[in-house]
Image (spheres, coloured by chain):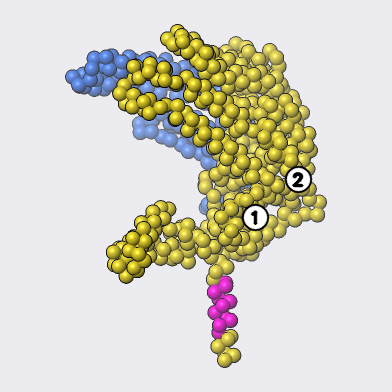
Amino acid sequence: MEVNSASVKQLRSRAREFLSFRQHPIKIIKYTAKYLWLLLLSLGKYLIATHFDIKSWVEANLFDLVILLAIFGFAFIRWITVYFELGKDRIITHTGFLGMTETIVYFEEIASVSLCQGPISNLVHSCTVYIDTDAKCVQSTDIRIDLTKSRAMEIYHIISRKAVSSTSFVYKADKKQLFVFSLLFSSAISGAIVLLTILYQAYRITDDEFNKRLIDTVNDQVQIIEGSGIWVYFLAGGSAIALVFVLSFVSNLMRHWDLTCKRGKDFLRVRSGKGARRHHLLRKKYINYLDFTQSFLMKMFNICSVEVSCTGYGKRRKEISAIIPITTSKDAVMSARMLVPEFTLCKTQLKTNKACIPGFIILPALSALVPVALGIVMQHFFPERKTQILFIEIMTALPLLWLTIVKCEAAVSTAFGFSANNVTLSYCRWYTFHKIALKKERITKVAVRQNPFARLFGTCTVVFYTTGEKTRRHLVGGVNYKRTIKLLKDNGYDFIGNNKT
Amino acid sequence: MIQVTRYRACKRTVFWFFLYAFGLEAAFKYGLRAVSGILPQTALIIADMVWAAMLITAVTVFPIYVLVARYEVSPQQVKLRKGFFIITDQYVPTASVMSVTTVKTPLSVLTGFNFVVLNSVGAKSIMPFVTRKQANQITKVVNEAIKQRLEKSGGQLWK
């Protein structure tokens, strides 16, 4: 009897060991075909139709059932063959078709680790683990496995042993501040308002009388659509856009809810999310740069968010690489200094000024004139619709006019400066202002560009290329050419022909 | 004393480019004549005009591009000047170069259609239209720099 219980215990411990190195059983369902539910629906329908007469149901759907079993069988075999091993200094995964792909990642080479748990995963206690190294040739994640929450946390703690430090600093996002600032400065909300207003006016234009005119001019196909009532499409489109924007705003807010960022010895620990909880470990030596981002309104009110460029962080769907989501600029700078003291903001050495405004605004201002010109032409052909056309004209020109205003601000705030080991770049890309704090060693290429107009006015655009998974260019435009060349030369970035001057 | 080698784009490429362009022009005209019975006259005129515009642009732009292009290569850095309308000066520290790709097209000894690509992390720099000899020299210098950097950092090299 004792021998029997001992063998049962042994079997149990073996099974436990076997399962502890396998993925979460939910993965079996994930491994099955994506649209399997369509087959299940049809099988369910037949079962109901036969009044749950299993025998006749099996006979009638034998082929479908065999296919279904084969799919589940294959998924189960895949689940068995895909496993991982934990070494003293490395993690080894056997993934791919029947676990044929073996990936070994040494803990020392890990750039970032992310643990993501969505609402459904939360219910079944599963967790997706992403492990990334700085191997730039691989765009996708090096290791991606679905484990039980406890096992995932175990790996997380093994890797993050070094992250524990007695002198750690923790940044906690203020929830009220996060909600209010996100609501006020979210581009999603302002974009939704503009789009909905345009759609409402378009709906107003397409009343019956206007439909008649359209019907007279367009072909029969369109006539059918118009006849069914074009306003319905505008209303449906408007509602869909509003819903998408609201959902996007809420999901974005939830993603950064309760964000904490903790400084460790050589890691940054980021935890965030409500509903879908995320844990990230970012190795400091693989951080490329810090990006203090601001929209125009945020700049006016001294609000900013801090993003970080680190391999693996922020590259998943709907993920932003923020370490400080949204707060006052002063707070952001102070917190960033405490979190990553290696990245310091340098004093500005070269700056654009008011004289640069024409160069910055000429293109957006000209493009803003295009809808105005089109509007004038349309008014000529449809004089009775002057008010509506004027409205659409203004609404279309508005984003471009806004861009012109943003570029006005960019013209007086574009700058860059060097210190012994760091570089700070301030520039504006489209509607967003960026302040980049990076180390000199992270610059892989510097280019100075001049078009004929820039040559005429003695200005240029400096392009800084930095290390990263994707090519990221930082364009500092409209700066004085001679001073730029001199400053770059003083900092070791020399160009052809400089020796003569 | 740092040894800097200066290179300019191979001017022979202009001649060969013109030859290719006129060869293509002849082929295009021949092709157009072959389909003249199928396509309407307006389409033929538009195609001819677009082709002529493209050819004139290429024939004007290419020689200027070749005249402007110049490179300076040393074990520490690579400097490039390129462009036609927008002239770009580039500085690439060899410390950031991970690998070098040399593209040698067939008959490039004659034509000069050789390209050296410096692959850095997050950036790529192309040195087009160098002679085969120059391409080999540039590749050698940059590869030597990479090798030395690896040796200094204690990295492993394939023997």
Q: In the structure shown, which secondary structural element does the residue marked by tag 1 occupy?
A: helix
Q: In which image quadrant can residue B24 be found?
A: top left
Split into 4 quadrants, where in the image is the N terminus of chain B? top right
The main secondary structure of the magenta stretch is helix
Identify which residue is drawn at 48% across, 24% down.
A203
Residue A248 left/right relative to A98: right
Q: Is residue A144 visible?
A: yes
- Specify whether A298 is left or right of A143: right
Callout 2 secondary element: strand
**Residue placed at 52% from the left, 18% from the top?**
A392
* Residue closer to the observer: B5 or B54: B54
Residue B96 in magenta? Answer: no
Q: Colour of chain B?
A: blue
Q: Residues within 10 Å of mark 2 (few under 14, many from 20)?
A: some
Q: Is residue B113 above or below residue A281?
A: above
The numbered disc on residue A108 is 1
Q: Looking at the colours in the rendered structure, which chain would you say is drawn in yellow?
A: A
Give amino acid for label 2. Tyr
